[in-house]
Image (tube, grey):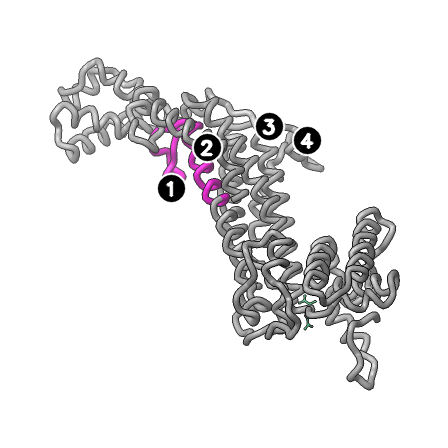
């Protein structure tokens, strides 16, 4: 039991209480951020004349040594300490003696942990964003390669109108683009430094908070010390953004699972990203997509859990806030893992162009275009709708596509039809006539691919702002 406090206590902490209270098992994850924060604090204390230059150098060297030793596995973080802050401070005092006891001057664990969590999540946001970018790159490659790969577009999971694979992937490109923008936005809003807020009411030392903020690459210090130690909004925003990423991945997973069924066979998942069955030798299962879909619940759970934790907490710091870590770490690991795995699966997946086109041809996805043909020949849309409905019924009965129905049968229902109906309802025509921006037509989609390329080209600039 190594604790930073105890002077006013007459009894030892009960072991169960100690265990219940301790956070070292999970907050050791941000030892590097804790040390980095301490180093900035020490530099500032010396600049302000609160520490001597000699003390500064001794402490900085000591902290650097601890960081290196933990990094390289020479120093183990053990449960003997209450939390990561106690571990670093106690180890420093062990190593350099009295100077180490000055590290915590003008600081509380409340502003320290608020800082550590911000530094840690800020690093993780960048990693998450990098993975989102990789996803966007894979999507763009597919979009470019499949501008004329026809497939059915669905509503209600019923074949609706023909689209292209490029267009379908483009929808996910837009979703992950918004995910990127959410991450950028969170980083922008959270980027203020709580260090110097003290326990809740600042300190009496002449700290230079602008200076520590700058050293730690924040836009400036937080402007209210009570909010500084107890703001966890950015964590909730991040959990929400990750939940949205997971929701997108889960929808995408569901589609891959459907496309991979024996009935659809739109895609072939690479062997490296599939799993087998212990009993059925023929099976090749889409476990990765299923796990991603399943793990979405974990991330939603973290969001719900932490929103609930925060809802009744009066100002300023309360120990409830220690609960901002385990679920959040799990949610970050889960979202990063799912993004990486899904992107790998997508990159190696084969698309069965023939099956997709056949499926579009046989699902009456061109029925709207047959009706539009009549409208273009002066038939009111509502009548055209009814006429084509009748033709569809005939085709269902004959088990053929609209493309295969002889012209006489068209004419028997409506004499307006001529030979050019077949051209008008071909998959190619149906798709390529849809040319408003955002539609699947070749030229419209090509324009979007170009804009998406520009978007990715300026991507890093956005994140580094
Ligand atoms: N382990 C604590 C946390 O994660 C550190 C802050 C402790 N502060 C306190 N006043 N007990 O929130």
Nearer to the camera, 186 or 281: 186
Within 10 angstroms of label 2, few (less than 14), some, or many (20 or more) residues? many
Rendered image quadrant of residue 56: bottom right
* Residue under pointer 1: 156
User: Position of 321 compared to 240: left or right?
Assistant: right
* Earlier residue among tags 2 and 3: 2
Within 10 angstroms of label 3, few (less than 14), some, or many (20 or more) residues? some
Q: Secondary structure at mark 2?
A: helix
Inspect the magenta stretch and tell me whether residue 183 lies in it.
no
* Residue under pointer 2: 169
Nearer to the camera, 3 or 321: 3
Rendered image quadrant of residue 117: bottom right
Circles 1 and 4: CB atoms closer than 8 Å: no
- Give the CA distance from mark 2 to mark 3: 15 Å
* Residue under pointer 4: 281
Judged by depth in the image, the label closer to the viewer, 3 or 1, is 3
Region in magenta: 152-180
Q: Which mark is residue 348?
A: 3
Residue at x 46%, y 20% (from the top left corner): 354
Q: Secondary structure at mark 4?
A: loop
Q: Is residue 349 above or below residue 59?
A: above
Whether residue 399 appears in this view of the structure is: no
User: Position of 399 compared to 149: left or right?
Assistant: left
The picture places residue 432, in percent across and down from the top left corner, at 32, 22
Within 10 angstroms of label 4, few (less than 14), some, or many (20 or more) residues? few
Q: Secondary structure at mark 3?
A: helix
- Give the CA distance from mark 1 to mark 2: 19 Å
Judged by depth in the image, the label closer to the viewer, 1 or 2, is 2
Residue at x 64%, y 69% (from the top left corner): 206
The picture places residue 454, in percent across and down from the top left corner, at 45, 30
Q: Secondary structure at mark 1?
A: loop
* Earlier residue among tags 3 and 4: 4
């Amino acid at each position: 039991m190594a604790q930073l406090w105890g002077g006013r206590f007459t009894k030892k902490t009960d072991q169960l209480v100690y265990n219940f209270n301790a956070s070292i098992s999970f907050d050791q994850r941000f030892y590097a951020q804790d040390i980095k924060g301490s180093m900035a604090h020490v530099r500032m204390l010396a600049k302000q004349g609160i520490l001597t230059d000699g003390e500064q150098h001794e402490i900085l060297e000591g902290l650097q040594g601890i960081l290196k030793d933990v990094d390289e596995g020479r120093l183990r973080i053990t449960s003997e300490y209450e939390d990561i802050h106690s571990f670093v401070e106690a180890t420093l005092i062990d190593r350099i003696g009295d100077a180490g006891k000055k590290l915590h001057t003008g600081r509380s664990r409340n502003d320290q942990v608020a800082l550590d969590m911000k530094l840690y999540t800020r690093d993780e946001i960048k990693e998450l964003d990098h993975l989102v970018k990789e996803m966007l790159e894979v999507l763009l490659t597919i979009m470019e390669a499949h501008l004329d790969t026809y497939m059915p577009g669905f509503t209600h999971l019923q074949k609706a109108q023909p689209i292209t694979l490029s267009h379908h992937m483009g929808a996910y490109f837009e979703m992950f683009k918004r995910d990127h923008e959410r991450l950028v936005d969170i980083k922008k809003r959270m980027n203020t430094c709580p260090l110097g807020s003290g326990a809740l009411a600042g300190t009496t030392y002449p700290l230079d908070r602008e200076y520590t903020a700058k050293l730690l690459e924040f836009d400036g210090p937080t402007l209210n010390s009570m909010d500084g130690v107890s703001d966890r909004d950015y964590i909730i925003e991040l959990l929400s953004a990750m939940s949205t990423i997971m929701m997108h991945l889960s929808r995408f997973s569901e589609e891959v699972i459907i496309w991979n069924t024996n009935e659809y066979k739109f895609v072939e998942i690479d062997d490296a990203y599939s799993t087998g069955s212990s009993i059925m030798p023929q099976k090749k299962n889409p476990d990765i997509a299923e796990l991603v879909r399943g793990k979405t619940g974990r991330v939603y759970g973290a969001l719900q859990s932490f929103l609930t934790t925060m809802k009744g907490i009066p100002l300023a710091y309360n120990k409830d806030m220690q609960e901002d870590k385990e679920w959040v770490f799990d949610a970050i690991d889960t979202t990063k893992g799912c993004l990486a795995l899904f992107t790998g699966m997508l990159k190696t997946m084969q698309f069965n162009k023939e099956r997709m086109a056949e499926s579009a041809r046989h699902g009456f996805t061109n029925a709207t275009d047959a009706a539009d043909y009549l409208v273009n020949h002066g038939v009111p849309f509502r009548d055209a709708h009814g006429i084509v409905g009748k033709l569809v019924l005939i085709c269902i009965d004959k088990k053929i596509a609209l493309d295969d129905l002889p012209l006489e049968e068209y004419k028997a229902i409506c004499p307006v039809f001529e030979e050019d109906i077949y051209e008008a309802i071909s998959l190619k025509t149906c798709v390529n006539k849809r040319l408003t921006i955002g539609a699947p037509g070749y030229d419209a989609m090509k324009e979007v691919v170009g804009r998406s390329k520009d978007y990715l080209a300026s991507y890093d600039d956005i994140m580094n702002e």
